[in-house]
């Protein structure tokens, strides 16, 4: 019975918060939402987001989402704003203030200064008749019928609604600004998407003495020793001009054994894979990975415009860099 009660209460929370989010559709269709978008699109400075308590946590998340999707933004604590941090807000900025009641003292206190600076104010409140709402250039109503908390006290559905509305604003602005995956990657260079979209072959490839390389006249035994020393699962075979003539890989070794080739007497030119797939510097690592996946190979020589060998990389390099 206790387990069932726990599940029932949790499901009730999900239902309540889902209803709160669904109810936001009516507000997005209002002129106030479009006015808020217009103010942020026309902003020449930053979108300054503020909120107190739980609304402050949501405000911080909204500021981070805006900043990472093409709308420069940062969070200012309203309590600290009254003690010097108002200096962070300039006349070129827009203020987005979150308060479910619309009467949060720390925010109401700074409203006269915001008006004096002539900074556009966007309010996100659950009370359209509140002090904050009435002072705003655009008020977005995020009121909810009830909180998910059975006591009706802890901010739950109301903070979820505010967070969802913040995401709606950020994504609407993202589309309007023509923000792309490449733009997102530039602000997330440490993330998986950043690595996939920004990392170049040049950043991963082995160069100089680390390249497994033998000439076309090298014995197969010496080519195998070069493969073992360099540890890339292959060696590149080059002509006397250092142009790539072929590769000899672990797969080629298995085929040589299967065909009963004498590994001690063979010359690498006779058993190599000629005219192999190659890539060039400046190519995205993700593109090289696609070539590997499509051709079912695990390593690639890197060549310049004259087909001269300048590097090599394999699947393990991709895995270590987080491209895969």
Image: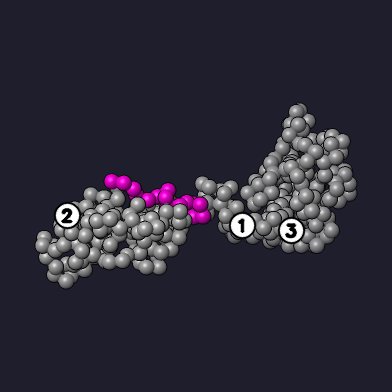
Foreground tag (1 vs 2): 2
Tell me which corner region of the image, top left, top right, bottom left or bottom right, holds residue 10.
bottom right
Q: Position of residue 149 (x, y in %)?
A: 71, 51
Q: Residue at x 35, y 64 (%)?
A: 277
The residue under label 3 is 20
Q: Residues within 10 Å of mark 2 (few under 14, many from 20)?
A: some
User: Considering the numbered disc 3 on the image, is that residue within a helix, a strand or a loop?
Assistant: helix
Mark with earlier residue (1, 3): 3
Task: Determine whether, in the image, residue 72 is placed left or right of residue 96.
Answer: left
Percent across and percent down for residue 320 are: 39, 50
In front of the other: 248 or 13: 248
Q: Identify the image quadrant of the C terminus.
A: bottom left
Magenta-highlighted residues? 195-209
Provide the residue designation for mark 2. 222
Q: Give the distance between the C-alpha atoms of the residues marked 2 and 3, in whole angstroms.
A: 70 Å
Circle 2 SS class: helix
Can residue 288 be seen? yes
Report the quarter where the N terminus lies: bottom right
Q: Earlier in the sequence, mark 1 or mark 2?
A: 1
């Amino acid at each position: 019975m206790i387990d069932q009660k726990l599940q029932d209460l949790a499901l009730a929370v999900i239902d309540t918060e889902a209803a709160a989010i669904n109810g936001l559709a009516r507000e997005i269709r209002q002129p106030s939402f479009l006015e808020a978008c217009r103010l942020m699109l026309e902003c020449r400075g930053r979108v300054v987001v503020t909120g107190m308590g739980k609304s402050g946590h949501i405000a911080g998340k909204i500021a981070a989402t805006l900043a990472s999707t093409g709308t420069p933004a940062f969070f200012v604590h309203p309590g600290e704003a009254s003690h010097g941090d108002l200096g962070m807000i300039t006349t070129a900025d827009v203020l987005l203030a979150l308060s479910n009641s619309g009467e949060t003292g720390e925010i109401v206190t700074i409203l006269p200064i915001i008006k004096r600076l002539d900074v556009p104010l966007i309010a996100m409140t659950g009370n359209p008749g509140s002090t904050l709402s009435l002072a705003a250039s655009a008020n977005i109503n995020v009121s909810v019928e009830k909180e998910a908390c059975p006591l009706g006290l802890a901010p739950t559905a109301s903070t979820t609604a505010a967070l969802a509305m913040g995401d709606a604003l950020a994504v609407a602005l993202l589309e309007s600004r023509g923000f792309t995956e490449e733009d997102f990657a530039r602000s997330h260079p440490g993330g998986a998407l950043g690595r996939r979209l920004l990392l170049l072959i040049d950043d991963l490839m082995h160069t100089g003495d680390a390249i497994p390389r033998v000439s076309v006249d090298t014995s197969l035994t010496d080519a195998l020793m070069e493969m073992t020393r360099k540890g890339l699962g292959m060696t590149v075979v080059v002509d006397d001009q250092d142009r790539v003539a072929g590769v000899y890989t672990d797969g080629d070794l298995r085929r040589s054994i299967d065909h009963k080739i004498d590994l001690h007497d063979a010359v690498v030119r006779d058993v190599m894979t000629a005219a192999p797939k190659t890539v060039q510097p400046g190519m995205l690592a993700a593109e090289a990975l696609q070539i590997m996946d499509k051709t079912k190979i695990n390593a690639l020589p890197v060549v310049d415009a004259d087909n001269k060998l300048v590097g090599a990389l394999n699947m393990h390099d991709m895995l270590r860099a987080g491209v895969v």
